[in-house]
Image: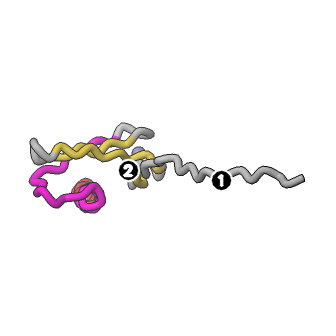
Protein backbone atom coordinates (compact mmCIF):
# COMPACT_ATOMS: atom_id res chain seq x y z
CA UNK A 1 0.00 0.00 0.00
CA UNK A 2 1.35 3.27 -0.98
CA UNK A 3 1.32 5.94 1.42
CA UNK A 4 -0.42 8.93 0.38
CA UNK A 5 1.97 11.60 -0.22
CA UNK A 6 1.00 14.65 1.51
CA UNK A 7 1.94 17.65 -0.30
CA UNK A 8 4.05 19.68 1.89
CA UNK A 9 2.63 23.04 2.24
CA UNK A 10 5.25 25.44 3.04
CA UNK A 11 3.78 27.94 5.26
CA UNK A 12 5.81 30.93 5.84
CA UNK A 13 4.42 32.95 8.60
CA UNK A 14 4.84 36.47 7.51
CA UNK A 15 6.88 37.55 10.38
CA UNK A 16 7.71 41.12 10.14
CA UNK A 17 10.97 41.90 11.71
CA UNK A 18 10.04 44.32 14.38
CA UNK A 19 12.06 47.47 14.39
CA UNK A 20 13.43 47.01 17.83
CA UNK A 21 16.85 48.17 18.80
CA UNK A 22 19.11 48.16 21.78
CA UNK A 23 18.61 50.91 24.26
CA UNK A 24 21.84 52.77 25.10
CA UNK A 25 20.42 53.71 28.45
CA UNK A 26 19.01 50.56 30.00
CA UNK A 27 20.59 48.06 27.65
CA UNK A 28 17.39 46.28 26.74
CA UNK A 29 16.32 45.62 23.22
CA UNK A 30 13.26 47.71 23.60
CA UNK A 31 13.77 50.71 21.39
CA UNK A 32 10.97 51.28 18.99
CA UNK A 33 11.05 53.74 16.20
CA UNK A 34 7.99 55.35 14.77
CA UNK A 35 8.50 57.03 11.49
CA UNK A 36 6.31 59.94 10.67
CA UNK A 37 7.50 60.66 7.23
CA UNK A 38 4.75 63.10 6.46
CA UNK A 39 5.57 65.17 9.47
CA UNK A 40 9.28 64.65 8.85
CA UNK A 41 10.13 63.39 12.26
CA UNK A 42 10.49 60.13 14.07
CA UNK A 43 9.89 59.13 17.62
CA UNK A 44 12.35 56.89 19.34
CA UNK A 45 10.98 55.24 22.41
CA UNK A 46 12.29 52.71 24.82
CA UNK A 47 9.70 50.30 26.11
CA UNK A 48 11.82 49.43 29.09
CA UNK A 49 12.98 52.70 30.54
CA UNK A 50 11.37 56.03 29.86
CA UNK A 51 13.79 57.16 27.27
CA UNK A 52 12.14 59.03 24.49
CA UNK A 53 13.50 61.24 21.78
CA UNK A 54 12.33 62.90 18.66
CA UNK A 55 14.52 62.92 15.63
CA UNK A 56 13.70 65.62 13.17
CA UNK A 57 14.67 66.56 9.66
CA UNK A 58 13.79 63.28 8.07
CA UNK A 59 14.12 62.98 4.40
CA UNK A 60 12.04 60.59 2.33
CA UNK A 61 14.83 58.06 2.26
CA UNK A 62 15.43 57.93 5.95
CA UNK A 63 15.03 54.46 7.33
CA UNK A 64 14.56 53.49 10.91
CA UNK A 65 18.18 52.33 11.04
CA UNK A 66 19.25 55.85 10.20
CA UNK A 67 16.98 57.16 12.88
CA UNK A 68 18.53 54.80 15.32
CA UNK A 69 21.99 55.99 14.38
CA UNK A 70 20.98 59.62 14.78
CA UNK A 71 19.37 58.79 18.08
CA UNK A 72 22.51 57.11 19.38
CA UNK A 73 24.58 60.10 18.35
CA UNK A 74 22.21 62.47 20.07
CA UNK A 75 22.05 60.35 23.14
CA UNK A 76 25.78 60.25 23.66
CA UNK A 77 26.19 63.89 22.77
CA UNK A 78 23.67 64.78 25.43
CA UNK A 79 25.46 62.55 27.89
CA UNK A 80 28.77 64.18 27.30
CA UNK A 81 27.25 67.57 27.87
CA UNK A 82 25.87 66.41 31.14
CA UNK A 83 29.22 65.12 32.26
CA UNK A 84 31.02 68.36 31.81
ZN1 LIG B 1 15.82 51.89 27.78
Q: Which mark is residue 8?
A: 1
In the picture provided, is 35 more to the left or to the right than 16?
A: left
Q: Residue furthest right?
A: 1
User: What's drawn in magenta, residue-wise?
Assistant: 51-73
Which residue is pictured at 37% across the width and 42% down the height?
A: 46
x%, y% of residue 22? 42, 54
Residue 53 is at least partly visible in this image: no
Would you say the beta carbon of the disc 2 residue lies within 8 angstroms of ligand 1? no
Front residue of 44 and 39: 39
Magenta-drawn stretch contains 57: yes
Assess disc 2: are there few (<14), some (14-19) or many (≥20) residues with their C-alpha within 10 Å of its C-alpha.
some
23 in magenta: no
Residue 76 in the image: x percent, y percent? 29, 60
Picture mark count = 2
Sequence order check, earlier mark of 2 and 1: 1
At 65% from the left and 53% from the top, the residue drawn is 8
| Quarter assignment of residue 62 | bottom left
Give the camera-side residue of 3 and 37.
Answer: 3
In the rendered image, residue 24, in percent from the top left (x then y), is placed at 39, 55
Quarter of the picture containing the C terminus is bottom left
Badge 1 local density, few (<14 within 10 Å), some, or many (20+)?
Answer: few
**Spatial separation of the CA atoms under disc 2 and disc 1:** 32 Å
Residue matched to label 2: 19
Q: Nearer the viewer, residue 18 or 23?
A: 18
Question: Residue most toward the front?
Answer: 1
Where's residue 26, x and y in %?
Answer: 45, 48
Q: Which one is nearer the viewer's eye here, 20 or 2?
A: 2
Amino acid sequence: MGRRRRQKVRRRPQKRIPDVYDCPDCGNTAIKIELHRDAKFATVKCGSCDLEMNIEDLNPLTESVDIYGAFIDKFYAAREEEDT
